[in-house]
């Protein structure tokens, strides 16, 4: 999409002090900035997000939560269902950036905070962890183009299962979390990609065309993974 983080123009190995949950993001987008630096460079970082760049913001919350919580200034296409999210004018969000971040990453009910310029959405502040496991830009499926060309997207829900153990206490079958899924098909019905997530919007955001070596026909498929939902309940699906 766009350039990488303005502080790093190429993917690099994450430094050892980066929390494990954010290591993948640092390797892709470069090291984070602090909240105060984000305020100083606010206009520059928002403009970068408009061009496709993610900027990580390190927020130290270990004392209160037991772990650090990072945020990010991200492009709108990294936000599922952005039309339902709270909105902040850029001029109002800058001096209240900590409040914006808190609203985005609040445990259990945090949600992306949309940034607007002259009432037009331009970027978002999100919890950085929501950017983990998103598909590579080169593999993402353009939903609008797919549908305009006669393709289709099938939505469904996989109930998951609790897993099982042997009488000796060994894990026999790994548990699988429930998830919504989306399957993209060409006009002739050939499946070309899929996505899965905690909501329909998450599944569509993660809809991607996987490399051949990642293909699997063993359901169910994990968030960000690839397989064919062969045993899903057809009554739980809906065609767009």
Image: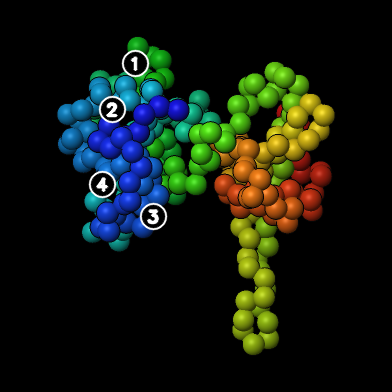
Quadrant of residue 105 within the rendered picture: top left
Residue 108 or 168: which is nearer the viewer? Answer: 168
Give yes or no for contact between labels 3 and 1 (Cβ–Cβ under 8 Å): no
Q: What residue is disc 2 on?
A: 45
The nearer-to-camera label among 2 and 4 is 2
| Alpha carbon distance from label 3 to label 1 | 32 Å
Q: What residue is disc 1 on?
A: 117
Answer left or right for 63 relative to 194: left
Question: Which of the two labelled residues, at mark 2 and mark 1, occupies the earlier sequence position?
Answer: 2
Question: Which of the two labelled residues, at mark 3 and mark 1, occupies the earlier sequence position?
Answer: 3
| Percent position of residue 134, x then y | 50, 42
Q: Which mark is residue 34?
A: none
Answer left or right for 171 relative to 123: right
Question: Which of the two labelled residues, at mark 1 and mark 4, occupies the earlier sequence position?
Answer: 4
Q: Where is the C terminus found, in terms of image quarters? A: top right
* Dot 3 alpha-carbon crowd within 10 angstroms: few under 14, some 14 to 19, many 20 or more: some
| Alpha carbon distance from label 2 to label 1 | 14 Å
**Which residue lies at the image location 82% right of the left edge and 29% below the top edge?**
188
User: Which residue extends farthest top?
Assistant: 118
Q: Which mark is residue 59?
A: 4
| Alpha carbon distance from label 4 to label 3 | 14 Å
Question: Which of the two labelled residues, at mark 3 and mark 2, occupies the earlier sequence position?
Answer: 3
**Which residue lies at the image location 65% right of the left edge and 21% below the top edge?**
145
Q: Where is the N terminus found, in terms of image quarters? A: top left
Q: Is residue 69 above or below residue 97?
A: below
Numbered disc 1: secondary structure: strand
The nearer-to-camera label among 4 and 3 is 3
Question: Which of the two labelled residues, at mark 4 and mark 3, occupies the earlier sequence position?
Answer: 3
| Percent position of residue 144, x then y | 63, 22
């Amino acid at each position: 999409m766009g350039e990488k983080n303005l502080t790093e123009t190429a993917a690099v190995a994450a430094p050892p002090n980066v929390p494990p949950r954010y290591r993948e993001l640092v390797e892709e987008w470069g090291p984070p900035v602090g909240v105060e630096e984000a305020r100083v460079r606010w206009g520059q970082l928002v403009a970068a997000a408009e061009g496709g760049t993610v900027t990580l913001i390190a927020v130290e919350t270990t004392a209160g939560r037991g772990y650090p919580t990072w945020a990010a200034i991200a492009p709108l296409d990294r936000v599922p269902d952005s039309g339902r999210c709270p909105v902040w004018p850029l001029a109002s969000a800058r001096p209240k950036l900590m409040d914006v971040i808190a609203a985005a990453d609040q445990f259990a009910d945090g949600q992306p905070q949309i940034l607007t310029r002259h009432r037009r959405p331009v970027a978002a502040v999100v919890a950085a962890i929501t950017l983990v496991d998103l598909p590579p830009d080169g593999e993402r499926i353009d939903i609008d183009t797919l549908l305009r060309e006669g393709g289709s997207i099938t939505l469904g829900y996989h109930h998951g299962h609790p897993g099982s153990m042997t009488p000796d206490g060994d894990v026999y079958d790994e548990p699988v979390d429930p998830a919504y899924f989306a399957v993209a098909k060409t006009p002739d019905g050939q499946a070309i990609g899929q996505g899965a997530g905690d909501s329909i919007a998450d599944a569509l955001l993660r809809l991607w065309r996987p490399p051949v070596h990642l293909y699997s026909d063993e359901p169910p498929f994990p968030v960000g993974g690839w397989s064919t939902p062969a045993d899903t309940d057809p009554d739980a699906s809906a065609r767009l």
